[in-house]
Structure formats: C-alpha cells, structure tokens
Amino acid sequence: MVKESIYGLTFEQLAAWLLERGHKPYQASLVWEYLYRKRVTSFSEMSDVKKECIEMLSESFEFQTMQQHVKQESEDGTIKFLFKLRDGNLIETVLMKHKYGLSVCVTTQVGCNIGCSFCASGLLAKSRDLSSGEIVEQIMNVQLHLDQRNQDEKVSHIVVMGIGEPFDNFENMIDFIKVVINHKGLAIGARHITVSTSGLANKIYEFADSQLPVNLAISLHAPNNELRTRIMKINRAIPIEKLMESLDYYLEKTNKRITIEYILLRDVNDHKEEAEQLADLLQDKKQKVYVNLIPYNPVDEHSQYQRSEEESVLTFYDTLKKRGINCKIRQEHGTDIDAACGQLRSKQIKKEKAQ
C-alpha cells in the first residue's frame, strides 16, 4: 500500500480521521504541534502522543514522499531545489530572500498544460496534479533546510507560482493553504501568501467565494486578445473580457487588491502602445490593481523571445504611472542560476535522458 503524506491533511481532516478511529480531539493538536512547530521527521519522535495513535498514523501516512535531487544556490541567496517524487517525477521549489523575509515559490503540478509560448514550465506537458501533501512538503523541506542552518530563520511568505496552473489543481491548492495558515502550526500569514493563475475565470469566482484571505495574481502578459492569444493559448478559451468579468466579481466579493503579472518580451508586448492599452484595460480598476512588470528570463527552447531593452521597460513603466496605474519593476532573483521557472527541471530531464 502506498502511504499518503501526513502533510496532506488539514487540521480539521486530521482531527476527524483520529476521531473516527476512537482518539480524542486533543491528540490531533499534539500531532499537529509535532508536525509544524517541533517539525519532527518521524512518528517515533512524537513522545506525548498515545502509542496506539502513533501506530495507526504510521500505518497510513509517511513524512517523506520526495527527495532532494539537485540544489542550486545563487550569489543573492536564492536557492532552487529540484525534488524527485516517489514516482520519479521532478518538481522545482525556490527559496528567495527579500528585505521583508523569506519567500518560497511552490509547484502545484508535474508539468503544465496552459501552453504559454514563452514559459519553461510548459516545455513538458502536465502528467499529474500534486497532492496537497506534496505541496505542503515543499514548504517543510525548505523550512527543515533553514532549521539545519541554526539561524532561527522561518519561511514568512509563499507564492504559488511554480510549475503548473494552481487553479487547475484547485482542491489540493486550497487544502495546502489551509494547512500553512493554520495558527497552531506554521502560522504563515494569509496576507503573505499569493496565488497566481493564468486566468481560469470559473475558478476565480470559486476562489472569491472561498473567502480565503490570501492574495490573487493574474498572469496577463498582454493587453488585447490578439496578442494574448498568440503568446498564451488559454486566451482562446477564456478571452480577456471573460477574465475581466471574473476579476470584477472577485474585487466586489473580497475588496482585495489584485496583482497583474506582465512579463516584458522584446518587440512583442513591450511597446508604448501596449502600455496604453493595458492602462485602458485596467482604468476602471486602477484603485484595486497593481501591475508587476517582470524582466524575462530567456529560455533556450523559446529563442524567439528575448528580454526587453532597459529603455523599453522604463517607457512602459512611465506610461502606466502617468495613466495612474500602480506598478513596479520586479526585483530579480537567482539570475546566475536557472532563473526561469521550470528551466532546471527541463535541463535535468534532458541530461538524464542523454546519459
């Protein structure tokens, strides 16, 4: 029998699982504290939990469902982990240092089917979703890495922007969030968590209705349907008009600001004309949106795309600012390693196939 990850249970699910098997609710609190506060790596270390409970848990669950396969460290402190899952698949997780704390970018799927023509994550098609436990375990592996350095460092922020489309793995992504924000465990502030989507409008409605107080980011990357369809095939199914309608609903339902992600591609979407179109598109939402202009990390397989010239980036930025759109140029991390999301995974798979 393949055991599930113990990290895949929300606190409520863990309590219900134990209660169904005759254990008192306080046992769930003890187990939870050992998992996320004391961060033990085996059930045998849970000395205060009843022996019968430990035996039952160890028969059904395990701690490690992935192993570190490759680790790259950048001069700026960024660390990119390549984890091998027990089925042999590879996923990426990235630790980034900011002035405000330590942020981890997690992966939600093995591969991606969204098909953005500039993205390294989609070089290999989606083979499966990650379980909620596999997503949580990425955070735990990074936190254990920090614990081993004995510097009293803690993961403080999470971005769900790694390989895959988070809203295409909606239920597991929601359970992951419920685990990491639980105040009895890792207690990562909901306002410190951002989930990114390429624009699955039906799930944006559902996300708004969930009332989870985490942040939403939209991977837009183009201000009109013709251009967006050319570089992001999802726009064929969900054009910008439908996406904007879902964002209107989200803003009305949550009153939370949305981040608009916009990767600047040289001579593709970085002209002043596109900046004006983007300002027009967001004009009625300009008090509640924030544009994140992202320098492009070139990918060998997508050689038709290059990083925008600095002058173009500044012109784009200035145009938005003059139109009253809040925006910034994102600080880069890990430029001396495989910076593009999915790049390390793709290179490693090619390397291993060639051996």
Image (cartoon, rainbow, N blue to C red):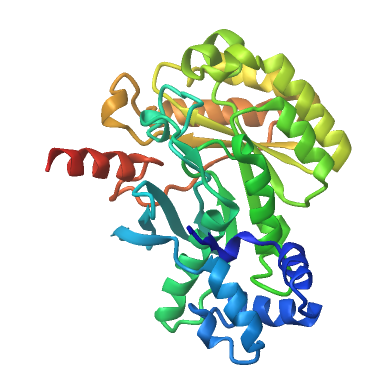
Residue 324 versus residue 196 in the image, above or below: above
In this rendered view, identify the residue nearer to me: 59 or 28.
Answer: 59
Q: Residue at x 40, y 33 (%)?
A: 296
**Residue 68 position in % (x across, y down):** 34, 61
**Residue 40 position in % (x across, y down):** 52, 80
Q: Is residue 115 left or right of residue 291?
A: left
- The residue sitting at the left extreme is 355
Q: Is residue 283 left or right of residue 128?
A: right
- The residue sitting at the right extreme is 252
Q: Residue at x 22, y 38 (%)?
A: 350
Total number of numbered discs in the rendering: 0
| Residue 43 visible in the current orientation | yes
In this rendered view, identify the residue nearer to me: 89 or 279.
Answer: 89
In the picture, residue 151 is in which quadrant?
bottom left
**Quick one: quadrant of the C terminus?**
top left
In this rendered view, identify the residue nearer to me: 30 or 78.
Answer: 30
Q: Residue at x 47, y 30 (%)?
A: 313
In the picture, residue 5 is in which quadrant?
bottom right
**Residue 93 position in % (x across, y down):** 44, 53
- The residue sitting at the top extreme is 226
